Image (tube, helix red, strand yellow):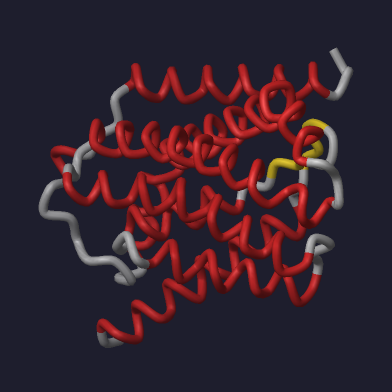
Amino acid sequence: MNTKTKTLTLIAMYAAMAYVTVAIFRIPVVLFLSYEPKDVIITLSGLTMNPIVPLIVSVIVSLLELATISTTGIIGCLMNIISSCAFACTASIIYHKKRSIYGAAIGLLCGALVMVAAMLLWNYAITPLYMGVPRAAVVDLLLPAFLPFNLLKGGLNAAFTFLLYKPVVTALRKTTLLPKSKTAHKNRFNPVLIGVSIAVIVTCVLFILAFRGII
């Protein structure tokens, strides 16, 4: 299998997996906002390939959503692309500049922060248009709803991506879809960072349960 074919195969695989996750796994958090783990898959595509791939995958998945399961139309499609790219492309760019476990952690953290900032801005600008509500009503929701939701989303995306990256890379290298690493010694998982990732997931889950009034 040549390099171009491997690249197309990986992009198709990541797009299919991301679409399946958004179609099956939707976890209501607050108001009309739900957590979908598709950004984890989209980010893995950038970490394992290059920072342009998450843009391609996010566009493919968002268009598939628009044509099949979306209820928010073209504006929702645009917001999905912006959210996914803000997180995944930022994380991938930083990781590819510093290819180490700490580079991945810093990239994921920065990706989460960029996504939070971007979504607050775009929700302020666009939500009134497709929801048909006054901008003042959206402003009132920025801190109590949109900010905590995007912080939870960013935290879960970063933690899940960090934990899944090594197993995914190992599996893909065994299939020869990815080449052998020349820097394997730099990418050994740090138990402290793994513990932090698990703690973030547990904390976010507890917050979601609290938002839903379950606990």
Percent of width and height locating residue 84: 53, 53
Q: Nearer the viewer, residue 102 or 91?
A: 91
The quarter of the image holding the C terminus is: top right
Q: Nearer the viewer, residue 101 or 179?
A: 101
The quarter of the image holding the N terminus is: bottom left
Residue at figure coordinates x 75%, y 29% from the top left: 141
Q: Nearer the viewer, residue 187 or 139?
A: 139
Residue at figure coordinates x 79%, y 61% from the top left: 72
150 left or right of 110 in image:
right
Percent of width and height locating residue 201: 58, 25
Residue at figure coordinates x 39%, y 32% from the top left: 109
Depicted 105 relative to depicted 23: above or below = above
Percent of width and height locating residue 95: 26, 45
154 left or right of 65 in image:
left
Residue at figure coordinates x 68%, y 24% from the top left: 205
Can you see residue 173? Answer: no
| Outermost left residue | 182
Quarter of the image where one finds residue 211: top right
Depicted 4 relative to depicted 23: above or below = below
Can you see residue 205? Answer: yes
86 left or right of 95 in image:
right
Depicted 76 relative to depicted 93: above or below = below
Q: Nearer the viewer, residue 129 or 17?
A: 129
Count the marks: how many?
0
